[in-house]
Image: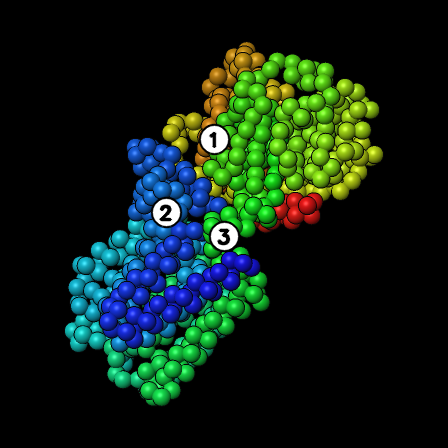
Amino acid sequence: MESVEIYLLTFLVVTGCMYQQKVNKHTFNLFAIIGVFILIIFAAGRYHVGTDINTYTNIFERYSSYDWPTFFANVDSEVLYAIIAKVTYMCGGRVLTWGTFAALITIPTYLALKKQYPDIAIEVSFFVFGFSYYTTAFNVTRQIIAVAIIFWGMQFIYKNKLLPYLIAVLIATGFHKSAVIAVVIWFLWDHKSNCPISGKRRIITIIVATVLVFFYQNALEFLSSHVTFLSTYEGYAEISTRGQNRDLYVHIIEWVIIYFLQKHMEEDKAVVMMINMLTISVLVGFAGFTHPQVKRMAYYFEMPAKLVLAGYLPYAFSERSRWLAKFMICLWFFALFVLSAYILGEANLIPYRFDLFSAWQGAKMRKKLLFFIPSLAGGGAEKVLVNMVNNLDETKYEITVKTLFDHGVNKQYLLKHIKYDYVFKNVIRGNTKLFKLFSPEFLYKKMIKENYDIVVSYFQSPTTRIIAGCPNKNTKLVQWIHNEFHEPNKIAICYRNLDECIRLQKKYDATVYVAKTVKDIYLNTFPEIKKNDKVLYNVVESDKIIEKSKESIDNPELYNSEFTLISVGRLVPQKSFDRLINVINRLVTDGLDVRLLLLGTGELEETLKKQVRDLRLEKNVEFLGYKKNPYKYVKNADLFVCSSLHEGFSTAVTEALIVGTPVVTTVCSGMEELLGQNEYGLIVDNDMEALYKGVKKVLNNRRILEELSVKAFERGKKFNVVETTKQIEDFLDTLV
């Protein structure tokens, strides 16, 4: 909770600065500048807190790595937001980027309050801003920037300047396309009388707004389907059972209080205007009971209204009671903040923890973790490891990833705070046999030179034997099992003999399995090593996958066949792509117009290409090699096929579900956990005949294919990076 306490202290200081610049005319705007500067510096230090922090960090790093032509070809966010993210991250990293975004939120908001509403109690307005919207701002950064710009641009409404206001709206859409809704605010002002709408016009506006609330779902579905630039927000129209919208009751209470107090205030155009806006925001808020995403559109009306009205409300009271009114308003919003952060347990949404703070605490508090793996090649386990360490809380863990051999495409995706090291620059042929010549204790001493709190062998490989030689009794040892092993000799291949295998595995303090079936099979094979066994599912960055899947395909002619099948994985015996190619051959013989796309590289590449040539399937099977972004290829395919002999918890199948591509797979460990009892995909026996019949069954029935697509997307929503990461962190915390 330390980030919450720091947050409270910071905003109390900022409120004090705002108060000083209000009461002391001689200081001009000095204290206001200090207050705003504090907020910008405060946000710049954002550190691994907030629901979207990892997603944002990944976006920043990706944008900064592009040259400008590549950037404009691949930008998948609103263009102004993307440009600023790229430039600032290139020039100063995360601190400059978050500081810039904080400035884009705070400065327009302050200027709007100060210049357009000079008679308000600005310290009260900023207190409300801090405890209602600044906490949200860095979890929905793009939209709150857009709201701040719209708020600033409202000055042109009061001046009857349509073109400048539309330009402000256009700039705001460069950060979040939903800002187009702010055009509505223009019509809340009577431009002939130069005052807010009232009387019949107000009633009509409320009626229209109410109708829109009840019919917005159909409208949004239509617009997102037919208007290209709104397609990003198609998901906003989806009904959610999580639409609790408990804060709507609070908004209604606030609206009622303000409505009845307005008669005690002087006739102020701004008050009437803001009451109209607050009314619309409350009406839109009703949508949050089933559509929490659409409720966010209320921010454009709600944030300006609350900030302005909170500043005006004290003047509805006598001068004698005004200080009490200010106190009660601040107390109300502070109480809501405490309720959310402490009682409802949403402190994780408060997006602040400081680098300086973590450095101050970190030396004593952070646990040193080492993940040891043969390489960071293009396999699923390697990708999952990178996803996991990137998402672990760097304020809690000092993380090192070490490989036996310095190669692999996944190395480039490690975030900058992850320390990377390796033992050998190049792969040593016959290394498994070579390592057996030396004791685990000798190898550990030579290869692992630092002390760690936890050392993880993230693969059943020579690394598992090496780590077992750790001499430090205070170091906790973990082996992470990714594959099913039905025979003891297959596990013992990295050891001198089976006895050594069992003896060394008993030295581990815990064993993690990526699926329940992997655990059951492993313990059935080695019941004597049972100790602190844990099933932890792979960390999959679903938001990033969905985002990247929307990129366009460079060669769309790949999808010219009636049915496009796809499979992703290393070209190794385990994946059994040879029998998948034979399945394609039988489907072509049956007269089906099919094409198989194979993404991956490996030792069997030339063998598989020869098989394709021998079967004359060059037009039906395409080898695409390794792709940085496989998700766009998977999303555009009709069917994902997994032909593996065995798996752990298939990353490729998981990713197919996330992008909504139907799956047919052979029965392997983890598949029932992914697909249920054929509920979310089709699981067949692990042989070529069953795979052929399963694929043909799906392709011959479009209804089944469409149903599986819907079910796949539904299942894909269950993979939550925040939840899976938390489970891993909870497990690691139990060890030390």
Amino acid at circle 1: Gln
- Can you see residue 64? yes
Q: Nearer the viewer, mark 3 or mark 2?
A: 3
- Can you see residue 707? no
**x, y percentage for residue 182?**
30, 61
Element at badge 1? helix
Real-space Cα distance between discs 3 and 1? 28 Å
Mark 2 surroundings: few (<14), some (14-19) or many (≥20) residues within 10 A: many
Q: Is residue 616 left or right of residue 471?
A: left
Reading the image, the residue beneath label 2 is: 97
Q: Is residue 91 left or right of residue 698?
A: left
Q: Is residue 272 left or right of residue 395?
A: left
Reading the image, the residue beneath label 1 is: 412
Of mark 3 and mark 2, the one earlier in the sequence is 2
For the point 68% across and 23% down, the residue is 443
Real-space Cα distance between discs 3 and 2? 19 Å
Reading the image, the residue beneath label 3 is: 357
For the point 79% across and 20% down, the residue is 497
Amino acid at circle 2: Thr
Mark 3 surroundings: few (<14), some (14-19) or many (≥20) residues within 10 A: some
Element at badge 3? helix
Give residue 538's mark: none
Asked if the residue under mark 1 is in contact with the one under mark 3, i.e. CB atoms within 8 Å, the reply is: no
**x, y percentage for residue 494?**
71, 22
Of mark 1 and mark 2, the one earlier in the sequence is 2
Q: Nearer the viewer, mark 3 or mark 1?
A: 3
For the point 69% across and 18% down, the residue is 435
Q: Looking at the picture, tell me which residue is in the foreground, 74 or 457.
A: 457
**x, y percentage for residue 437?**
72, 15
